[in-house]
Amino acid sequence: MKLLKDLGVKDKRVFLRADLDVPLEGLDQIHHKLESETATRLTNLKETVDYLIREGAKQIVIAGHIDRPEKPDPSKSTKLLLEVLSNILKKDITFKEDLEGEASGGLILLENLRFWGGETKNDVEFAKKLSGFADVYINEAFGNSHRGHASMVALPAILLHAAGLHLEEEIKVMTNLLTTPARPFISVVGGAKIETKLPVIENLSKISTHVLVGGELPLEIERNGQKFGENVLVAKLMEDKHDIDLESAHQFARLISSARTVVWNGPMGLFEAGCEIGSRAVAMAILDSKAYSVVGGGETTQFLEKQNLLSRFSFVSAGGGAMLEFLAGKKLPGILALE
């Protein structure tokens, strides 16, 4: 994989593919969180933007998507992020809503890429339009790197390309989890969607001391009749099925207490409905263990933000689905495109 430090950017125009897919409800609250947390999708951009400016890039076009619009929708415009991004990056940013003409130089925020149908279709002609704004492509969107979209795959095939500084760190952390974790190594998998989580559980079971499974997954596992090895522990649930039971919470906490490495993706229960016993037991056990801790997934980080615990974890991944696919041993299209 090509890295930013090996790519000259002096006097170059840079297309910076970013993770902009953040909730837009209550931007004032989001702004406050972004200022107080150190590992979020938007704040992850700062190190790379600072590097590009320091190295003399003459133009930086920041581009990404919000949600899954099928046509232009003002409520999902990246323009809504202008003030927040400007405050995070400590720079003035110009907004560009179309792909016509030249960009103005300096720091530019492009409209939601999914407003154009060519993005999700990995359309080469759409990628060629995007390439008109840049000489160099930088991927700083780990959270979208499992998508074979035009700005992730077709565009880097046209331009000189490299991984951004945070993407480089993401890949290093995830690779180390799969190859050289300090042991005991505990993996915690929760949430729902067994079809997504099953490959992760199976792959992590080959390298983890224990894989601890909670959330809605125990119901789906029982329903589908899945069987695992002895190192995969599937939680028992409360009577209402909305959280893991106390026995499982204590068992998980006890196993985590001796860990030297822990990775966690997916809550243990419906914390949105106040069912927090399992997730809080796992979170506190990880923090008390002093293990190197990696956490990811929107619901998991949302729970930890609510508990004011997120910043205490060693590494917060910017990816949810991308993190899961990486840990399942799959090759991500957006990363393969950087080779």
Image: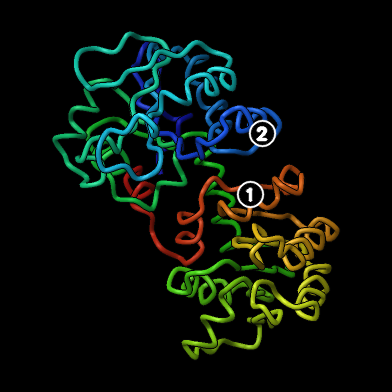
Image location (x, y in percent) of residue 192: 52, 69
Image location (x, y in percent) of residue 45: 52, 30
Quadrant of the image containing the N terminus: top left
Q: Which residue is disc 1 drawn over? A: 302
Q: Is residue 105 above or below residue 212?
A: above
Number of other residues with Cα within 10 Å of mark 2, as a class: few under 14, some 14 to 19, many 20 or more: few
71 vs 89, left or right, is: left
Q: Is residue 88 above or below residue 300?
A: above
Q: Which mark is residue 33?
A: 2
Farthest residue to the right: give it: 288
Instruction: Calculate the distance from the C-alpha at mark 2 to the C-alpha at mark 1.
Output: 11 Å
Q: Which mark is residue 41?
A: none
What is the quadrant of residue 189 in the picture?
A: bottom right
Secondary structure found at label 1 = helix
**Is 33 in front, or is 156?**
33
Mark 1 belongs to which amino acid? Gln
Is disc 2 in contact with disc 1, using a CB cutoff of under 8 Å? Answer: no
Number of other residues with Cα within 10 Å of mark 1, as a class: few under 14, some 14 to 19, many 20 or more: some
Image location (x, y in percent) of residue 153: 28, 44
Mark 2 belongs to which amino acid? Lys
Residue at image position (57%, 33%) is 26
Secondary structure found at label 2 = helix
Residue at image position (60%, 33%) is 30
